[in-house]
Amino acid sequence: MLNGTEILTTAQMRAIETAAMDSGAVTGLDLMERAGAAVAGQIRLRWPKPGQATVLCGPGNNGGDGYVIARLLHRAGWRLRVLGLDNIPGPDAAEMKRRWCEIGPIEALTGDALRRPGESSDVYVDAIFGTGLARPPEGAIADILRYLGGSGGDRAFFRERLVAVDCPSGLCMDSGAFLGRRRQPGDYDLQARLTVAFDSPKPGHLLERGPESCGELVIADIGLQDWRIIEPGRARSLRPPALTAIWPLFAIPDRRRMGFESLKRGAWLAKRESRAGHKFEHGHALIIAGDFGHGGAARLAARAALRAGAGLVTICPPRSAMVEHLGPPDALMRRPVDEAADLARILEDKRITALCLGPGCGVDRAAELLPVALASGRACLLDADALTALAASGLEGLHADCVLTPHRGEFARLFPDLAERLAGPQPPGPTGDPDQQSHDRDAYRAALAGMHGPAFSKIDAARAAAGRAGATVLLKGPDTVIAEPSRARAPRLDRPGRAAIHSAFDVPWLATAGAGDVLAGLITGLLARDLNPFSAATTGAWLHAAAARQAGPGLIADDLPERIPDVLDQAASGAGGDP
Ligand SMILES: NC(=O)C1=CN([C@@H]2O[C@H](COP(=O)(O)OP(=O)(O)OC[C@H]3O[C@@H](n4cnc5c(N)ncnc54)[C@H](OP(=O)(O)O)[C@@H]3O)[C@@H](O)[C@H]2O)[C@@H](O)CC1
Ligand SMILES: [K+]
């Protein structure tokens, strides 16, 4: 069975919906009715006393959901204003529109109508665009979206009252970017109080602007689960390869969907921990440290590697910095490494299974040791200064057992063109000029080539980077994306490997000095234990945020490794649904 962690791209969602309808078991009308009922139900939960609602309906099926919501709220005693377009939508939305018209009028969906004095509502339902948004909103609709985002000075007013159907309109569900806008937080970006999405989270709910714009995210079950499984027992849906999300599930109301992949993996880790065995069966990790006075980063990494369950961990500073590492933990071993030859000698011991290079290392030292580390063929976690050295070497020597953990700045040093695409404006939408439109659409489609959605996403960037590096890439952030290179025998750009999103927007205190070093150590420990690079990176990211969640605000990086036993314990006992 699939679990609540799987996210679906908009293309996968459409494929599943089509498969369900083609089977004859449900109709599009059934699905739309369920979707609308889910949103109306969530509104009634939060506003138990019927009030006034304004429902804004767009040209497609998202608008169709809006007409259902209007009908169901009306039935529950709400006063309704429905604003819509005079287009002829697809058959399901058209039928829902017809059913609403038997109840009440539809006003034109214009900024003037929305702004009309004396028409204030308790709830505004944004059913303008959903997963079908294909290009930046323009004209009257763009004006409406800006107004809902606060261009009239009412930002706080709408933030309290806006309920988004499937997603806030204008937000690209494959990237979390507002189409046609700058990637940075912009003025008048829509911010909903509540977003009710259907069946599964989409990448856009979890990436970039998505989490803030969606507000509280509720995933509503609309009965599509039978069409999400190709092979029983495998959490894979339709091609392109599934994305998995490891994320805090506090917003998902259905507890049955709370068993999730990382929790299971945590339980598995803890189980392995309790299995009797020799320490070497759990691997041996080397953590390279830097000059005197810079050893804290490597010590944090070493402590984390121990907590992640590596059988042995050795920290390797230069001889002159040895004294800095003489304190606890006593479980840590120490060996000096002054130059590349020292490291090569240590690596003659075949029992060393992984090494971590970068935290507090210094760029020159990292550059000297990097070729030996890579040539050893051991699993390598490369972070911080090692990434700078790697960028200078043109990614030379990387192999499939490497994990790179760049933040945005390091990513830009390693993959400047991808970073530029990621930061740059979205492909422009067609202009309002009818003579220009077909030309613009072609240009727009051309600009989309090579992306999996309407905008170049962090997933696209991480996947392209992993493909280029031939290694697993973990692009850090509150919306960490992890991508592995294609596992096809000959790497193919059109057959990327797995990707995961780890959403940790709920633990802002994790952005603290040394936290990245702990993450590097956790992943190194897991690599040492022979987890494959993708699993080590995703599990490490989850452990890291779970430990931060346990520690709470006021966290310093030193606290993180100490929380790992509790996280594993809870995972093993199946408790702590919100690890
Ligand atoms: N998946 C499911 O299981 C279920 C999905 N359901 C619902 O369906 C939603 C998806 O519906 P959808 O595919 O009709 O897309 P939607 O978001 O309504 O927009 C498409 C319309 O907008 C237009 N358009 C696009 N961009 C534009 C622009 N910038 N400016 C102007 N127009 C623009 C586009 O026109 P076109 O590109 O064809 O010219 C088309 O007419 C989904 O989010 C969910 O709410 C539920 O009902 C049932 C279960
Ligand atoms: K919407």
Image (cartoon, rainbow, N blue to C red):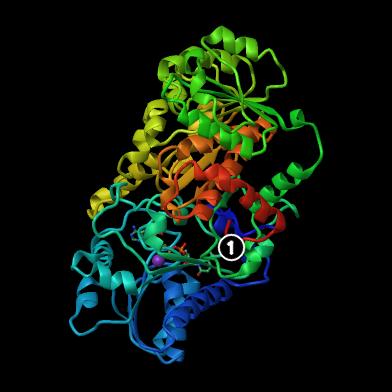
Q: Is residue 71 visible?
A: yes
The residue closer to the viewer here, 344 or 146, is 344
Residue at 66% in and 48% down: 266
Position in image of residue 230 (x %, y %)? 71, 53
Residue 274's spot in the image, x, y percent? 77, 44
Q: Classify the position of the N terminus by image quarter.
A: bottom right
Residue sticking out furthest to the right: 276
State whether residue 87 is above or below residue 301: below
In the image, residue 170 above or below residue 537: below
Toward the viewer: 133 or 470? 470
Instruction: Name the residue located 40 percent from the left edge and 49 percent from the top edge.
Output: 208
Task: Determine the image quadrant of residue 553.
Answer: bottom left
Question: Which residue, given by chain and number where applicable, does mark 1 sit on?
Answer: 17
Give the image quadrant in which the ligand numbered 1 is located: bottom left
Residue lying at 56% horizontally and 51% vertically, measured from the top left: 245
* 73 displayed left or right of 495: left
As rendered, which of 53 and 279 lies closer to the eye? 279
Q: How many marks?
A: 1
Which residue extends farthest bottom? 77
Whether residue 476 is situated above or below residue 488 in the rendered picture:
below
Report whether 221 appears left or right of 232.
left
For the C terminus, the image quarter is: bottom right
